[in-house]
Each structure stands twice: as structure tokens, then as C-alpha cells.
Image: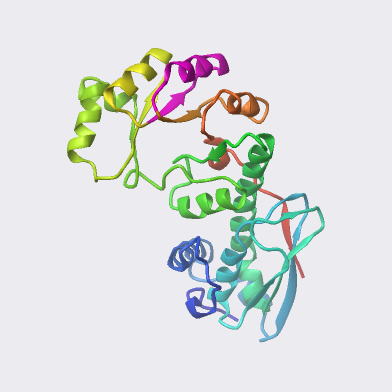
Amino acid sequence: MAHSPFRSTTQRLKDMSELPRETIEEVVRRALAEDVGAGDVTTAAVVDSPGRTEARVVYREPGVVAGIDVVREVFGQLDAAAEVDATASDGTQVAAGDVAAVVRAHTGAMLTGERVALNFLQRLSGVATLTRAFVDAIDGTGVRILDTRKTTPMLRALEKYAVRMGGGANHRQGLYDAVLIKDNHIAAAGGVAEAIAGVRRAAPAGMAIQVEVETAAEAAAAVTAGAQALLFDNMSVSEVERSVAVVTADVRLEVTGGVTLANVREYAATGVHDISVGALTHSARAIDIGLDF
């Protein structure tokens, strides 16, 4: 029996204050269109009754849950009467063998949506799990773990949500909501002072001016020119320590580049406020999760 994968279930979604409903609906719609295309030929040939099936979402390894509402939307778009009862909420640490949700839906919808639902859940849980590892590694320091713009195209909102579920924070959503003057901006403007002056003339009021620097000398020059935040880029721990020492103004300090689980606590001890880690979203390993009938 064929099923339309695009029936909206806005009215069935839970309140998701941290992830817009329309974002989930659109991303899932596109994912189902990519996978299902003109129809799931195997399921249409094998399932010829309107029976319903119950299945469990099982974590095969330890991880942090992220993406249950995306799973709910996948099956909801395939079967308006689908039910996804979460037994572990997003942000929860689970062990191998734990059941995160129970799904009840038309058997055809379950078979058609299984891969898409698991792809989202495995990806987002992987991001949340890696983020939690970094957050735990610097526990007690008061330093924040941030993400970057190094996200999967069209999945940024979901991946940044997963970072939050892992205990991290979002650096910026895109180019539109924060100022970050990088080396190429400085080169294009003719210098850091010129770049900062340009931002003050044209950028929306209220946006803090952050400048990327690679040496202590660049840090001092950026602060003198009016930078309100610094991003220490690809600097060793000792280089960051020297750069922190030359900054006497009330400037927010962030480090990025070359940060790993093995050295993140060393960076956190340098005096910075934030550590941004691109690997949270560009290198997170998918968590092994199954949908067991």
C-alpha cells in the first residue's frame, strides 16, 4: 500500500521552544522526498494490509539523546495517526540497550520512514554526545564550549540544537547575527582598524565586534582598535596564555582551532571565556541506534 510522505503534523508536534516546528517539518519533508521519491517500491509490494506496528528506538551504545521530535515528524508525515512516545528526552545520557522511544504507526509508514528517522537521530545524537564529552572535559572551569558554522548544509539549525542538548552553546547562527572580523576581512579592508571602523559605520547597532587574531601582537592591536571580543585562532596553549596576558581591557576571549578532548582542559585554564570546536558538527560520529519491531 502506497503512502503520501508529506502530510503535515504541525498540530501533533510538541512545543519545541528551542527548535522551530517549521524547521523540522521542512527538513523532514525534503529528506523524505529524497529517499522515497515516487514511492517505496519494496514496502508497497510487501505490505498490503492496513495493520499497525509497534517498534522501539534502541541505543546500541552509550550516548546523549537528540532528535526525538524529528523522529516524531518523520513518522507523522507518513502516517497522521503515528505515535512516538519518548522514554528518554533530548539531552538525556543513555546506556547501551536503553530504549529512547516507542513508535506506533502503520507498518508501511514504519518501514518507509525507518532509515530517514534513524539517520537524523544517529547524526544529532552523535553531535550531542561529542559535545557532552567536551563539556565534561572542562567541568568546573566556568568556560563554555561553543560550536561553529562548520555544519552540514541545510541542517545547521538541527545540529546547533544538538550541541545545546549536549550542554554546549551556539557561537552564531550565521553571518547575519554576529560580527566576526577574520583575516581576510582585515586584508580586504586594509587593516584591523579600518575593518572595525567599517563595522561601526555599517553593522546593526548592538552587535559586539569580535576579531580573529593569531598572535599576541595582533590581539593587542585589535583591542587598541576597538575590538570587544577576540578569537584566538590556531594558537598553542602557550601562545594563548601570552595573548591573554596582553589584554588588559574588558574583552571576551575565545579560542578555536586545534582543540581536542586531550588538550581542551589546558586551553580552558588559559583564562579564556569560550572554546569553539568545529569538530562538534563536522566530525561527530553517528551513534549506533536501531528501530526494533
Percent of width and height locating residue 40: 57, 70
Q: How is the image coloured?
A: rainbow
Q: Residue at x 81, y 53 (%)?
A: 96
Percent of width and height locating residue 63? 72, 50
Residue at the image position 24 percent from the left and 23 percent from the top: 193
The total number of labels drawn is 0
Residue toward you, 257 or 120: 257
Relative height, residue 31 to residue 135 (above, below): below
User: Does 159 lie within the magenta span?
Assistant: no
Left or right of residue 156, residue 179 in this image = left
Asked if residue 243 lies in the magenta stretch, the reply is yes
Residue at 59% x, 37% y is 142
**Does residue 99 sit above or below 14 in this rendering?**
above
Query: In the orientation shown, which residue stands out farthest toward the right?
Result: 97
Front in this rendered view, residue 139 or 103: 139
- Is 273 left, or right, of 72 in this rendering? left
In the rendered image, residue 25, in percent from the top left (x then y), is placed at 47, 68
Q: Can the viewer see residue 117?
A: yes
Give x and y (percent) for residue 169.
52, 45
Q: Residue at x 47, y 61 (%)?
A: 27
Q: Is residue 215 left or right of residue 160?
A: left
Residue lying farthest bottom?
50
Q: Tell me if residue 214 comes above or below residue 166 in the rendering.
A: above
In magenta, the rendered stretch is 229-249
Looking at the rendered image, the quarter that the N terminus falls into is bottom right
Q: Relative to residue 26, is residue 157 depicted above or below?
A: above
In-image side of 20 versus 1 (left or right): left
Query: Which image quarter is the C terminus in?
Result: bottom right
Residue 7 makes an appearance in the image: no
